[in-house]
Amino acid sequence: MAKQLEDNLHFEDRFNRKFYYLRLSVTDVCNFKCTYCLPDGYHPTEKKKPSFLTLDEIQRVTGAFAECGTTKVRITGGEPSLRRDFTDIIRTVASQPGITKVATTTNGYRMAKHVKSWKKAGLTHINVSVDSLDPKMFHQITGENMFHQVMSGIDAAFDAGFEQVKINTVLLKDLNSQELPKFLDWIKTRPIQLRFIELMQTGEMDDMFNNHHLSGVSIRNHLIGNGWILKIKSNNDGPAQVFCHPDYVGEIGLIMPYEKDFCQSCNRLRVSAKGKLHLCLFGEHGVDLRDLLAENGQRAELIGRIQGGLQQKAVGHFLDEGNSGMTPHLASIGG
């Protein structure tokens, strides 16, 4: 009976995977034009002004997830800091009982000015997208000449008291794939977890994928051959395989979605900026939750709908079979 009660406190799918981690998108707008995501910049899909989740709706959906075992919420976009109420969003999420990690993923352009207030509001972890340590290549990949602003923002995060900053680098053949030595030198004395993310195929990016996809296996082999050690994950960690080395302050993470059994340990769900539950970054229309976020008192129905949707979650994303699902680009549901 005790075991049954414990299970009832967690969202769980048909494959006995429990979900401790929510990726919550708060906008699909972005001000960068990254070649692997929005090479032509952000264009709204509707003529009218988009209606993204309000603070009240964010409070209700994160409260429901927290009640069912979620301990980590990552606030994503688009670029989440484009929301004028971004600091209030952090404070709202951090105030939910049971949420112990409040993270965000940002392109970093507003960090230098605002990261201290984000931390004060309750942000505990921060990821910054840095696809090259060469300013010209950074400009070429992101479409924006903001390398030095982003670097200043990372310094500001450490000054604000973050003990570690995670850096997301999309691995791109013939663009940044030769920069491993430079990246390793950068993290040798800095508490940075550098995460190389394999380029993922989406509906609008077939040519980009075919030209620039590179497996992370070669980097993993290099790390293991040079004394790097795989760390053990906690139950609300993301999908990265994280390696540490006694001679380095920093760490290396590898996210390799094309590897066999990548989805076996899936522990995260996604809610889009317009209130849809997405069971995977790739694959389906989503489950609309917004009608149950309009007012208090609907938490039981909201939890029931999420749990019901979870029973449709597939065993994996089938990327390795060339099926990129219905996701047009990574900004559309928060990456």
Image (cartoon, helix red, strand yellow):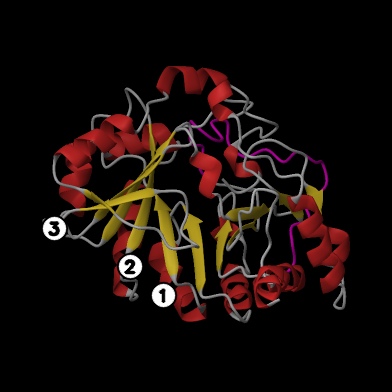
Quarter occupied by the C terminus: top right
User: Sequence-wise, which precedes: disc 3 or disc 1?
Assistant: 1
Closer to the camera, 3 or 6?
3
Residue 33 appears in view = yes
Distance from the alpha carbon under mark 2 to that under mark 3: 26 Å
Name the secondary structure under disc 2: helix
Read off the magenta span. Answer: 32-54
The residue carrying mark 3 is 246
As drawn, is 26 to the left or to the right of 220? right
Q: Depth-wise, is mark 3 or mark 1 nearer the camera?
A: 3
The residue depicted at 33 percent of the width and 76 percent of the height is: 161
Name the secondary structure under disc 1: helix
Label number found at residue 116: 1
Closer to the camera, 80 or 123?
123
User: Which residue sits furthest front?
Assistant: 1
Q: Are marks 3 and 1 in contact (CB under 8 Å)?
A: no
The residue carrying mark 2 is 156
The residue depicted at 35 percent of the width and 38 percent of the height is: 138
User: Sequence-wise, which precedes: disc 2 or disc 1?
Assistant: 1
Total numbered circles:
3
Residue 53: image quadrant is bottom right
The residue depicted at 76 percent of the width and 44 percent of the height is: 312
Name the secondary structure under disc 3: loop
Q: Where is residue 129 in the image (x, y as percent from the top left)?
A: 41, 48
Residue 211: image quadrant is top left
Distance from the alpha carbon under mark 2 to that under mark 1: 8 Å
| Residue 173 position (above or below residue 311) | above
- Magenta stretch, overall SS: loop
As drawn, is 334 to the left or to the right of 295? left
Q: Are marks 2 and 1 in contact (CB under 8 Å)?
A: yes
